Amino acid sequence: MQKKSQRDIKIDSNDKKSESDYAEVLPLLALDLKSSNKNLHIPALNRVLNIILKSPECLDEFYNQEMPSVLQRFLSPNEQGEKYVLSTTILHIVGVYEKVTDDVVRANAAIEPLIQIIHSPNEGRSSSACTTLMNLIYNIIIRSSLIQTGFLGIVHHTLALKPEELKKSSSSSEDETVPNHVKLGLLEIVLRLAEIEQDLQPFDDLIPILDELKTNGEGNMKSKAKKILKILNGEGIAASYLSDKEKIDRIRKLEQSNRRLEEENALLKEETEKLKSKRTKDLTMEIINPDTEDIISTPKFNGQLKISKKLSKTNTFSLSQVLENGVYAIEAEFFNSHDGYVMVGVVRDSFQIPAGIHPNLAGCNQHMVGFAGKVWGGVVYYKGSSTPGNTSFADSQIVKAEYDSEKGTLIFFVAGTQQPVCMTGIKEKVRFIIYMYYADSYCIIKSLKNLAIPTLRHVANENFIQW
């Protein structure tokens, strides 16, 4: 008679021990299950199963020993022996002990063993499980669990399997053909579900295989398939499958779409890199003063620039910044303007503005465009013509002009709102201009910026004047 080891003696005495003693044994069993000695595995699995059944309070130690990971080596579907049975049983019991609150998931714990038995090659056992599950279907939670947790996918898998596919997926030398009683039992369950369930859309994946059984099936299977299809057709459920040609066409379109997306992403990445290198910059604010006896430029402590008028006379001045190769914007606010007797615009860089001129003065108006204030109704002057449509402006309103050298556009904003009348076709260097008339009137140039990106948007009634 073989002498027992100390571990065997300790484990054999489990029936007389407390729950804490059971927990002490689990580390030893974990070692046996990790051992390369295969003779230790089945006894250890039996011990673990008994402990879980007798003492669910030991679950903390079960997880401390990482038992689910330890059991992983025995969970391969190709494992045919007792190790597979014991390890899956242990995990099933542990899963049920977890007290999952989702009723549909909990119901699956009852359904899953029955589905396994239905697939049994023993027709009597399979039929018994099928009858049990069909009776459970009247419970709405069981029914929902069957539909939502993969039962229909299992049915599709089993009905679609061909003998050659089964041989490829199994290492067993036994006859792997799915018995007809299994397929018929599954069809009976699907038929019962279809008769009771209101939402039959999840059944659409079964239609192709049901059509095949309707055409090529035999006896009861053909009859069951016809009945199920009649119910589905009556509810307007159509097959959600594609022919091989349709699949190829869809794959080709998806590939083309993916290529376009890759190209667009590459362009966006390139644009992003460009924008990173072209961040908005504040520019130095200085003017080209054509009349120093009238116009006074005073830098302010906050970086803004104040331009004042000493005399009541016509004068237009430009900023010194030449606008080229980018997007530029100026913001100005007027005071004491006498109801908006002012303008904002641009001038050709090649044109030197003389003292005492108005942007719409004959000769000069071929080189300048001006967005006029309220007294002129907010028109845009260019080449002797005035174009209405913009909101007029006067004192204490921020007026903005934005020039995009790449697009050749000049747009205007009043109090942050883009105006519809603007310029296009400017393909040369320009400078911003400001016009004022009355003595004691002044403007504050609040900012002069080189923008990273333009703010031009399409607006209602937009009207582009050709430069």
Image (cartoon, rainbow, N blue to C red):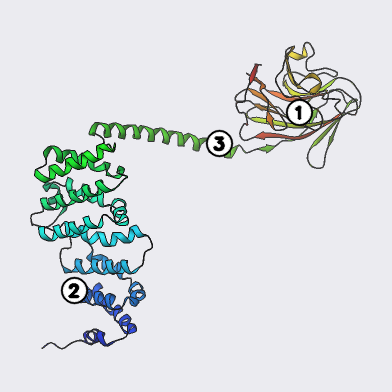
Q: Mark 3 = which residue?
A: 274
In the rendered view, tell whether residue 175 sits above or below residue 221: below
**Contact, mark 3 vs mark 2 (Cβ under 8 Å):** no
| The N terminus, quarter of image | bottom left
User: What amino acid is labelled 3 in the image?
Assistant: Lys
Front residue of 290/80: it is 80
Q: Can residue 177 be seen from the camera position used here?
A: no
Where in the figure is residue 153, as x and y percent of width and height? 25, 49
Where in the figure is residue 298, as x and y percent of width and height? 85, 35
User: What amino acid is labelled 1 in the image?
Assistant: Ser
Per the image, label 3 sits on a secondary structure element best described as helix
Per the image, label 2 sits on a secondary structure element best described as helix
* Residue 42: mark: 2
Front residue of 155/162: it is 155
Q: On the image, which quarter does residue 136 sit in?
A: bottom left
Where in the figure is residue 380, as x and y percent of width and height? 73, 19
Front residue of 328/287: it is 328
* Residue 173: mark: none
Whichever of labels 3 and 1 marks the residue nearer the N terminus, that label is 3
* Label 3 to label 1: alpha-carbon separation: 27 Å
Residue plotted at (24% across, 87% down): 13
Residue plotted at (65% across, 38% down): 280
User: What amino acid is labelled 2 in the image?
Assistant: Ile
Per the image, label 1 sits on a secondary structure element best described as loop
Assess disc 3: are there few (<14), some (14-19) or many (≥20) residues with their C-alpha within 10 Å of its C-alpha: few
* Residue 320: mark: 1
* Label 3 to label 2: alpha-carbon separation: 67 Å
